[in-house]
Each structure stands twice: as structure tokens, then as C-alpha cells.
Image (cartoon, rainbow, N blue to C red):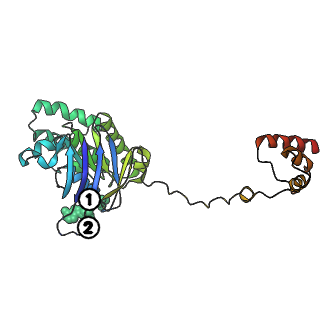
């Protein structure tokens, strides 16, 4: 559905690439987080998917199309498949909730009847029923973001891109917005979300792709924001006794002197000796156990 093949991006006038040999694939209906420090390249990845940037090297395929081959004329049609939400909502201040969402339908030529059906439906999905006539300044931040999400998905795009959608919201409101995004994802829309929100990522248990200086350094099917650092542990002290070369016991030395009896005889002869070593074979161990028992 979304495939980056060795994508590098060097912005004009820059010496370091914003994307450095980035390769990944996001499947239909997947939910993936993009994480990484500020400037690591998350927004640049999203802007490539939205066809706002072109790679310096490599290819981006979305919905089976090589984006480099889409003619300028077809870009608006392509973008209907990709909804986008931002940290700062970007609503039209002089339009109501209904009008903000309806606008996305109007520009692609939907009829009034279609709009009258689709807008209330999507406002219900994002939990804004009853607030159709409010203006953005009459809404909380979380509600404004719900409007922005409704506007982004009203045309039923296959992909929803979200660039820090919870960046301006408190933790409880962020969680609510996450629920809305998960609901949209469950309805079949792939969601790619760039975020710095540690608890949102940790709680979601979804795919996590981490960028560092434009390169992918981690891609986990079910990831967290920061993987646990593996603690360094001192290696266990070696088992000195086990590593010592075989030292002849008194019994063995005596046995050697009087001819060569079997090992059982030798062991049995020195059962109380403090210098006796444990026998090396299983049959010898059971013999030892019997002898120990008997000597107590
Ligand atoms: N239009 C541009 N011209 C030049 N450099 C740019 C441009 N857009 C982005 N960059 C640079 O590319 C790098 C990646 O930026 P990007 O915005 O993708 O990072 P990010 O991970 O989204 O950061 P943040 O978390 O702060 O949003 C940065 O070094 C940035 O300065």
C-alpha cells in the first residue's frame, strides 16, 4: 500500500539528507507510528506520501502507483486517497463544523444530497454529533482535532496521515483522539502517525518505525516509544572447580600403586577423604550418593 524503496531526500542548500536510504512498507489497513527526535525526518516521510515532496533518490509507491510517474494533472485525484491531520488542526475559522467537513466533499464535486448524508455520519464517527453549527473558536482543542479528522476521512481515503495530532492536547484528550484514530483504522483506513507522545505509543501496542537523522533505526511490529535499554550484567564468575584439570586423588594414587582396580573400588575406598573429587559419570554419582547416605 505504501512502499519506500531506498528513498533519500536532500533539500536544496543542505549538506545532510533529511531522509537517508529509507526503505519500508505499510500494508492495507495497518496502523504505524513514526517516532524519532525533532528533525529526524518524520514529517518529510509524510510529505512524500502526500506528494508534497519528491525523493532525490529512490522510489515511493502508494496504492500500487509509482508517485514519480503521476502527472501534475492527476495529483488532486491521487490526494483523494490520502487524508491528513496536523498538530494545529488547520480549520477554516469562518465556517461551522458542518461546513468545514462539507468543504472537503464540495471540492471533489459531491452533491448536496451526498454531503447531507456523509457529514453527519462522519461527525458521529468522531463523536461530534450535535455540534454541527459551532465555529472552531467555540470548540475545545480536542473537538477541533475531531473536526479535522472528520474532514480528513469524510471522502473515505485508504490512508490517513497524522502529523503530531495530539501535540497540542492534554493526555486525556490525546487518548480520546487516539480512540477516534483507532476506530477509523478498524474501519479499514491505514493510519500513519508521526508523534512524540510516549504514552500514546506505549499504550497502543502497534507498529513503530523509528527514524534517526533521516535513517530508519528500528521497525517493530508491536513497539514502544523507547525500547528498554538492556542492562549490562557482570558475567557470572566461572566455575573454577569445574575448570580445574583433573587432579589425582589419594585413592587413585594408591590404586595405581597396588595395580589398577576399577574406579568404583577406588572411590569407595576414600569416601571420607576431604580431597575426594566428585566422580565424572552418572553411574559413579549414584554410587556416591549411596555411599554418602550410608556414611551419615
Ligand atoms: N523544506 C525544507 N528545506 C530544507 N530543509 C528541510 C525542509 N523541510 C525539512 N527540512 C529539514 O529536514 C530534516 C527533517 O525534518 P522533518 O520536519 O522531517 O523532521 P521531523 O522528524 O518531522 O521533526 P519534528 O518532530 O520537529 O516535526 C530537518 O533537518 C529539517 O530542518
**Front one among 5 and 146:** 5
Q: Are marks 2 and 1 in contact (CB under 8 Å)?
A: no
User: Alpha-carbon neighbours of circle 1 within 10 Å: few (<14), some, or many (≥20)?
Assistant: many
Q: Residue extending furthest right?
A: 295
- Disc 2/disc 1 C-alpha distance (Å): 9 Å
Q: Is residue 296 visible?
A: no
* Residue at the image position 25 percent from the left and 44 percent from the top: 2
The quadrant of the picture occupied by the N terminus is top left
* Residue sitting at x 62%, y 60%: 235
Q: Which residue is mark 1?
A: 19
Q: Determine whether the beta carbon of the residue marked 1 sits less than 8 angstroms from the nearest atom of ligand 1.
A: yes
Q: Quadrant of ligand 1?
A: bottom left
Q: Is residue 26 left or right of residue 104?
A: right
Comparing 153 with 63, the one in front is: 63
| Residue 204 placement: quadrant | top left
Query: Does the rendering let one see residue 153?
Result: yes
Q: Residue furthest front?
A: 259
SS of the residue under disc 1 = strand
Mark carried by residue 118: none
Q: Position of residue 209 (x, y in %)?
A: 35, 51
Q: Tell me the element at label 2.
A: loop
Q: Which residue is mark 2?
A: 16
Q: Is residue 256 above or below residue 287?
A: below
Question: Mark 2: few, some, or many residues within 10 Å (few <14, many ≥20)?
Answer: few
Q: Camera-side residue: 215 or 284?
A: 284
Residue 211, horizontal then vertical, whole percent: 34, 57
The answer as to whether callout 2 falls within 8 Å of ligand 1 is yes
- Number of marks in the image? 2
Tell me which corner region of the image, top left, top right, bottom left or bottom right, holds residue 274. Answer: bottom right
Amino acid at each position: 500500500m505504501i512502499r519506500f524503496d531506498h528513498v533519500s531526500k536532500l533539500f536544496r542548500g543542505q549538506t545532510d539528507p533529511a531522509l537517508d536510504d529509507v526503505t519500508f512498507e505499510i500494508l492495507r489497513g495497518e496502523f504505524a507510528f513514526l517516532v524519532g527526535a525533532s528533525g529526524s525526518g518524520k514529517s518529510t516521510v509524510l510529505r512524500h506520501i502526500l506528494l508534497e515532496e519528491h525523493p532525490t533518490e529512490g522510489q515511493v509507491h502508494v496504492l500500487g502507483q509509482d508517485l514519480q510517474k503521476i502527472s501534475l494533472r492527476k495529483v488532486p485525484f491521487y490526494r483523494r486517497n490520502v487524508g491528513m491531520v496536523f498538530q494545529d488542526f488547520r480549520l477554516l475559522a469562518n465556517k461551522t463544523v458542518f461546513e468545514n467537513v462539507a468543504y472537503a466533499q464540495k471540492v471533489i464535486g459531491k452533491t448536496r444530497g451526498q454531503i447531507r448524508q456523509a457529514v453527519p455520519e462522519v461527525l458521529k464517527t468522531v463523536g461530534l454529533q450535535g455540534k454541527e453549527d459551532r465555529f472552531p473558536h467555540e470548540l475545545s482543542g480536542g473537538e477541533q482535532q475531531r473536526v479535522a479528522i472528520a474532514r480528513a476521512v469524510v471522502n473515505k481515503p485508504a490512508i490517513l496521515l497524522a502529523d503530531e495530532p495530539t501535540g497540542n492536547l492534554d493526555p486525556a484528550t490525546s487518548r480520546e483522539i487516539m480512540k477516534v484514530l483507532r476506530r477509523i483504522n478498524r474501519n479499514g483506513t491505514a493510519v500513519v502517525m508521526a508523534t512524540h507522545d510516549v504514552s500514546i505509543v506505549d499504550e497502543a501496542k502497534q507498529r513503530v518505525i523509528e527514524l534517526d537523522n533521516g535513517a530508519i533505526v528500528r521497525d517493530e511490529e508491536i513497539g514502544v516509544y523507547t525500547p528498554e535499554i538492556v542492562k549490562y550484567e557482570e558475567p557470572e564468575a566461572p566455575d573454577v572447580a569445574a575448570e580445574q584439570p583433573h587432579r589425582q586423588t589419594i585413592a587413585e594414587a594408591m590404586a595405581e600403586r597396588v595395580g589398577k582396580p576399577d574406579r568404583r573400588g577406588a572411590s569407595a575406598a576414600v569416601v571420607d577423604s576431604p580431597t575426594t573429587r566428585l566422580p565424572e559419570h552418572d553411574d559413579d554419582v549414584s554410587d556416591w550418593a549411596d555411599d554418602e547416605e550410608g556414611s551419615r
